[in-house]
Image (tube, rainbow, N blue to C red):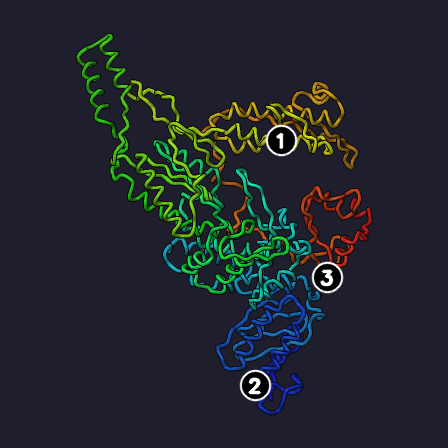
């Protein structure tokens, strides 16, 4: 058999034809050489990759080789060499890559097998396993930044083809792509839930690229199963419990990948009426929508779906998803997440209804299902709304009184007679309530929704009946206790923590022609002060409308105490920035928090009276810390109790604004976690390096543990450690030199 040698920087490359020589595969049988060659080649490639984090890549390359040798269509693989840092041409259409042991690549007409090259020195550098991992991510199908471009292409395709079915291989392009999991890990790693275990103690602590590849391997052979969650019951405000399912944090990486794909497909389909759990949508965007669209509507339906998340039927939800997505492996993965169930004590419970609250994909699945309700209500709106474009229609009585008044002015009538005509014209209701002015408005945030009707009470009851019947047809129930019909001109409506009501006091403005005209009765969005008083009383800040000492905070430092009180003030003021009664509310809130803060500091320092705290720290409660730097200079850091602005701006909604925070689905803005090319912080090793996690910064003990001191100094909740040092840390046997801390 002829052999052709090709000189490359790696050494001699043996070009072997389909019938391989005996010395290359010593186990090859002389009889029926071709079939045995294919089988032995699969075993040979399997052993060369066994135990590494690239077993998924191995399957792809072995299949390509077998296709080449079986006469099937050839596939050209273009990959980088791990030792030269760039592409090296071997044949006109082939480049190759070294995989620490054997290298396998497929060309148009030949099979290349390189000898071991892990220790081969090329160009003055040796092969780097950490660099090899990064190149795996860069060269896999659809990997690197290209996968996010594909995600944007998918979103754009869904936006431009709203009624078309998605027939792409989503499972291969996204679910089996390591880069998607790096993005998921980047988003989830700093959240508290990443260190909250489910039914087993597994968390994101110890996460590494190898762990991600193990998950992908199980997804590739479809043996991956979601771990059942742990049931945690949260008491509801009006009685009962809200079930919260605490899942495995590593399963959440897969759920986040599913959520990204579903968001790209369904986000362009959702209507502007929906504001819950969506990008660039929030409570403020929903309230702004009401403030601008609902003016003039009299009857409001305050709707609520009873146990919405726990009542969504799996079969109907999956039929809805499968009608849009044809990739069965992807939809089957969603079904696995729904059927995972949970443990209530020792009992494993699985239901055929409900999307578990606490799951990452639960909100978007609920939005997908409730999108049917949005479509139904918008159809009602299209049939109910008046086709008359002129919204300034008045009653005939109003125009009659207006005509008599203008006629009297032209005839020169003055005194009491003219005054009577003016009073009559202003006392008549000008608004026309008939079919020419009726309209319907709708907004939804998760399972809470409002339908506002400019029409009669009878029409509003009929609309509620139709919506109730439709919800029953899709397996949902409109709550009879929480669903009410309210007149917005007489009573307040509580939606998203805000009171909404039409103004009752008439205001006037000067017309461009110089006469006074009546303004419309605008909507008033106000703070529910009574509810906030109750909330502050429950957390131990107030009692009987007076501030009290927060005894749970006395072990904290003075700076931490003031910081905690500032978070309360800023939280309420930022949320109710648009409120009509913001000035009064801000003044009351500041006084209550100021009083409680004084009492807490007096309790901590045993000063007895609040006036002593004011004498020491001032009336604005200024805490000064004197910090000595390495050069001997003393720096003063101050923290004051936050004093809010009392200025009222009814348009100060915080939603749908541009920020510097990159969106999760943006190609240029997405952030990837760095799990490759890691080195241990303690011993500088690059072997089996994984990420050590803590749940919160306050869980660190920098005065006791040296590693915690390093994390506190860097202000990080994750730090890379090799497996050996990581186990020593959890066994409290890890020792770090103090010089490295300083």
Q: Residue at x 27, y 38 (%)?
A: 386
Instruction: Using the image, tell me which numbered label, if any, was put on residue 35.
Output: 2
Is 656 left, or right, of 79 in this rendering? left
Q: CA distance from mark 3 to mark 1?
A: 45 Å
Please provide percent x and percent y for residue 289: 41, 37
Q: Secondary structure at mark 1?
A: helix
Q: Is residue 382 above or below residue 625?
A: below
Percent position of residue 302, x then y: 42, 38
Q: Earlier in the sequence, mark 3 or mark 1?
A: 1
Residue 153, labelled with which disc? none
Residue 441 location, x and y as percent?
Answer: 36, 39
Crowding near the residue tagged with mark 1, few <14, some 14–19, many ≥20 C-alpha atoms within 10 Å: many
The residue singled out by tag 3 in the image is: 687
User: In the rendered view of the protein, which quadrant contains the N terminus?
Assistant: bottom right
Q: Which quarter of the image is occupied by the C terminus?
A: top right
The residue where tag 1 is placed is 566
Of residue 530 and residue 559, the one placed in the foreground of this image is 530
């Amino acid at each position: 058999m002829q052999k052709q040698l090709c000189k490359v920087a790696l050494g001699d490359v043996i070009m072997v034809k389909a019938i391989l020589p005996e010395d290359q595969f010593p186990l090859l049988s002389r009889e029926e050489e071709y079939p045995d060659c294919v089988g032995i080649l699969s075993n040979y490639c399997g052993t060369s990759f066994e135990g590494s984090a690239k077993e998924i890549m191995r399957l792809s390359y072995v299949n390509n080789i077998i296709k080449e040798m079986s006469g099937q269509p050839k596939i050209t693989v273009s990959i980088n060499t791990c030792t030269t840092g760039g592409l090296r041409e071997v044949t006109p259409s082939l480049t190759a890559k070294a995989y620490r042991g054997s290298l396998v690549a497929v060309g148009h007409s030949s099979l290349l097998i390189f000898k071991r090259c892990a220790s081969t020195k090329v160009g003055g550098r040796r092969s780097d396993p950490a660099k090899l991992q990064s190149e795996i991510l860069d060269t896999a199908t659809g990997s690197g930044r290209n996968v996010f471009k594909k995600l944007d292409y998918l979103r754009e395709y869904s936006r431009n083809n709203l009624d078309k079915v998605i027939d792409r291989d989503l499972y291969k392009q996204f679910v089996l792509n390591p880069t998607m999991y790096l993005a998921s890990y980047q988003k989830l790693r700093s959240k508290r839930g990443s260190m909250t275990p489910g039914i087993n103690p597994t968390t994101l602590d110890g996460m590494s690229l190898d762990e991600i590849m193990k998950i992908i391997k199980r997804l590739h052979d479809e043996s991956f199963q979601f771990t059942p969650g742990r049931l945690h019951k949260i008491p509801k405000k009006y009685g009962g419990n809200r079930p919260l399912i605490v899942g495995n944090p590593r399963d959440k990486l897969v759920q986040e990948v599913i959520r990204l794909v579903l968001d790209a497909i369904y986000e362009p389909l959702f209507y502007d009426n929906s504001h819950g759990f969506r990008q660039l949508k929030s409570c403020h965007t929903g309230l702004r929508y009401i403030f601008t669209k609902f003016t003039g509507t009299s009857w409001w339906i305050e709707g609520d779906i009873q146990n919405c998340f726990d009542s969504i039927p799996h079969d109907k939800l999956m039929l809805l998803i499968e009608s849009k997505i044809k990739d069965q492996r992807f939809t089957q993965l969603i079904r696995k997440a729904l059927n995972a169930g949970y443990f209530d004590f020792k009992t494993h419970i699985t239901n055929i209804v409900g999307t578990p609250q606490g799951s990452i994909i639960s909100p978007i699945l609920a939005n997908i299902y409730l999108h049917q309700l949005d479509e139904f209500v918008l159809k009602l709106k299209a049939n109910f709304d008046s086709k008359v474009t002129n919204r300034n229609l008045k009653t005939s009585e109003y125009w009659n009184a207006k005509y008599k008044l203008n006629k009297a002015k032209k005839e020169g009538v003055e005194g009491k007679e003219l005054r009577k005509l003016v009073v009559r014209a202003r006392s008549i209701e000008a608004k026309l309530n008939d079919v020419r002015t009726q309209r319907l408005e709708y907004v939804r945030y998760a399972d809470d929704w409002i339908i506002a009707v400019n029409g009669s009470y009878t029409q509003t009851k009929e609309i509620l009946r139709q919506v109730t019947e439709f919800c029953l047809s899709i397996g949902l129930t409109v709550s009879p206790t929480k669903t009410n019909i309210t007149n917005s001109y007489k009573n307040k409506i509580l939606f998203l923590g805000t009171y909404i009501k039409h103004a009752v006091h008439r205001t006037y403005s000067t017309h461009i022609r110089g006469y006074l005209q009546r303004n419309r009765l605008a909507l008033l969005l106000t703070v529910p002060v009574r509810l906030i008083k109750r909330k502050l009383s429950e957390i131990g800040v107030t009692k009987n409308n007076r501030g009290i000492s927060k005894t749970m905070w006395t072990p904290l430092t003075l700076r931490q105490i003031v910081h905690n009180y500032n978070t309360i003030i800023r939280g309420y003021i930022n949320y109710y920035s648009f409120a009509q009664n913001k000035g009064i509310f801000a003044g009351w809130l500041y006084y209550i928090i100021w009083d409680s803060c004084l009492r807490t500091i007096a309790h901590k320092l045993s000063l007895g009276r609040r006036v002593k705290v004011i004498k020491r720290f001032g009336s604005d409660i200024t805490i000064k810390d004197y910090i000595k730097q390495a050069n001997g200079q003393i720096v003063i850091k101050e923290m004051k109790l936050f004093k809010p602005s009392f200025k009222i701006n009814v348009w100060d909604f915080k939603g749908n604004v541009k920020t510097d925070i990159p969106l999760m689905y943006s190609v240029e803005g997405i952030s990837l976690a760095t799990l490759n090319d890691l080195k241990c912080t303690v011993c500088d090793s690059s072997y089996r390096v994984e990420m050590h996690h803590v749940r919160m910064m306050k869980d660190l003990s920098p005065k006791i543990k040296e590693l915690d001191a390093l994390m506190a100094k860097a202000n990080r909740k994750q730090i890379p450690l090799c497996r050996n040092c990581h186990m020593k840390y959890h066994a409290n046997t890890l020792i770090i030199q103090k010089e490295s801390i300083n």
